Image (cartoon, grey):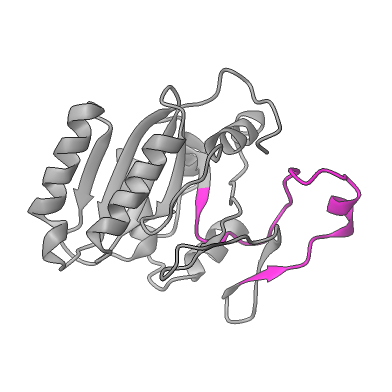
Amino acid sequence: CLQKTYPSQLPSLGVILIFMNEALSIIQRAITSVINRTPSHLLKEIILVDDFSSNGELKAYLDEKIKLYNRKYPGLLKIIRHMKRKGLAQAHNTGRKVATADVIAILDAHVEVNIGWAEPILARIQEDHTVIVSPVFDNSHFDTFELEKYALAVDGFNWELWCCYDPLPKAWFDLHDATAPVKSPSIMGILAANRIFLEEMGSLDGGMLVYGEENVELSLR
């Protein structure tokens, strides 16, 4: 993807970071990576959604950190806190309702984005505003920060509705393009979509309370 050229005019991007009792340092790493590795003219907002954390450092101390970020990048960061635990799907919906950017990327707060992560996603959604993009993400080992690259795969699911990696179809290999998208019957947690289209299709079902099913529910719908 880094070797490709993308349109100079791309949709604006809002990043929604979902968390519940993450370490403050992890959240800061996510915020910093998004700011440093997203072109500033594309990044419209970063929205933090706290699903009723009990960790004390995620209260006033996090608020102070957000103020510091906003001093340097005025109005970039917002935080919304649930007054009771609502679950992952409803936390996604909370962030979407507050967002104003053309495209929203819903991420876990324990991720770091890589260089050039946003442009391929935005270009794909600009081509077709009805696609939900689930980007490939790699594993960063918590004890060494070593990056373990994950190959592209189809995001499937089993009879327990648990997400799993399935082999790529022959039609994808026949394209001879490692950057080509592939259709998947499920979404592996992290997703990006046109904000208005996601709203029109009903967004995520807020009644999905257990991790995993909300990905299957959205993709089937």
Whole-percent x, y for residue 32 in the image:
34, 43
Q: Nearer the viewer, residue 193 or 136?
A: 136
The picture places residue 218, in percent across and down from the top left corner, at: 54, 57
Residue at 78% across, 46% down:
178
- Does residue 165 belong to the magenta stretch? yes
Q: Number of numbered discs present?
A: 0
Residue drawn at (16%, 37%), measured in percent from left and top? 68
- Magenta residues span 164-191
From this view, report whether residue 57 is shown above or below residue 114: below
Quarter holding residue 221:
bottom right
Tell whether 133 sits left or right of 84: right
What secondary structure is the magenta-colored segment mainly?
Answer: loop
Q: Which residue is drawn at 87% across and 45% down?
A: 176
Q: Residue 135: x, y in percent?
A: 59, 50
Between 214 and 138, the one lying in front of the other is 138
Residue found farthest to the top = 8
Residue closest to the eye, 203 or 77 = 77
* Residue 115 located left or right of residue 69: right
Q: Residue at x 20, y 57 (%)?
A: 82
Tell whether position 44 is magenta.
Answer: no
Residue 196 vs residue 189, the one in the foreground: 189
Residue 146 in the image: above or below residue 133: below
Among the 4 quarters of the image, the one containing residue 125: top right
Q: Is residue 156 left or right of residue 168?
A: left
Q: In this orientation, does residue 115 appear?
A: yes
In this rendering, the answer to whether 187 lies above or below 115 is below
Q: In this view, does 92 lie above or below 200?
A: below
Answer whether residue 100 is visible to the viewer in this image.
Answer: no
- Image quarter where the N terminus lies is top right
Q: Which residue lies furthest to the bottom in this view?
A: 160
> x, y percentage for residue 38?
45, 34
